[in-house]
Amino acid sequence: MEEGQGRSVTSSYLGWSICNTLCCCLPLGIVAIVFSSKAQNANARGESAQAEDAARIARNINIIALVCGIILIITAIVLTTTGTI
């Protein structure tokens, strides 16, 4: 968390959410963007508890999207190299 004007600002993970949407898992990335936006809006309103909750959900969804994307890429590489596709 960063300190800004006497209150803590929670990271929203918006950049990570956008990257996951474009590179890993589109449906989960979109959900992560929604929660990242909620975290940013809550930060702007000074509602740190809501910002932390939304940011935690966005982070967890981003982790799941990243893992799904890695599994999908590895599966595609294996299927391509074995000639199955």
Image (tube, helix red, strand yellow):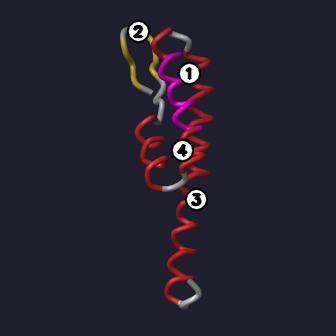
Q: Are marks 4 and 3 in contact (CB under 8 Å)?
A: no
In depth, the one of 19 and 59 nearer the eye is 19
Q: Are marks 1 and 2 in contact (CB under 8 Å)?
A: no
**Type of the residue with mark 4:** Gly
In this rendering, is residue 45 above or below 57?
above
Rate crowding at label 3 as few (under 14), some (14 to 19) or many (20 or more) other CA atoms within 10 Å.
Answer: some
Q: Which residue is mark 3?
A: 67
Counting from the top left corner in percent of width and height, residue 60 is at: 61, 43
Residue that label 1 marks:
51
Secondary structure mostly taken by the magenta-highlighted segment of the chain: helix
- The amino acid beneath tag 3 is Val
Say which residue appears at 50% left-offset and 78% top-offset: 77
Per the model, the C-alpha gap separating discs 1 and 4 is 18 Å
Q: How many marks?
A: 4
Please tell me whether mark 3 sits on a helix, a strand or a loop: helix
The residue carrying mark 2 is 6
- According to the image, label 4 marks what residue? 29
Residue most extreme to the left = 5
Check if mark 1's residue and mark 3's residue have beta carbons within 8 Å.
no
Q: Residues within 10 Å of mark 1 (few under 14, many from 20)?
A: many
Q: Which disc, if any, is residue 3?
A: none
Image location (x, y in percent) of residue 17: 48, 41
Q: Secondary structure at mark 2?
A: loop
Judging from the image, what secondary structure is the residue with disc 4 in? helix
For the residues carrying marks 1 and 2, which lies nearer the camera in this image?
Answer: 1
Highlighted range, magenta:
31-42
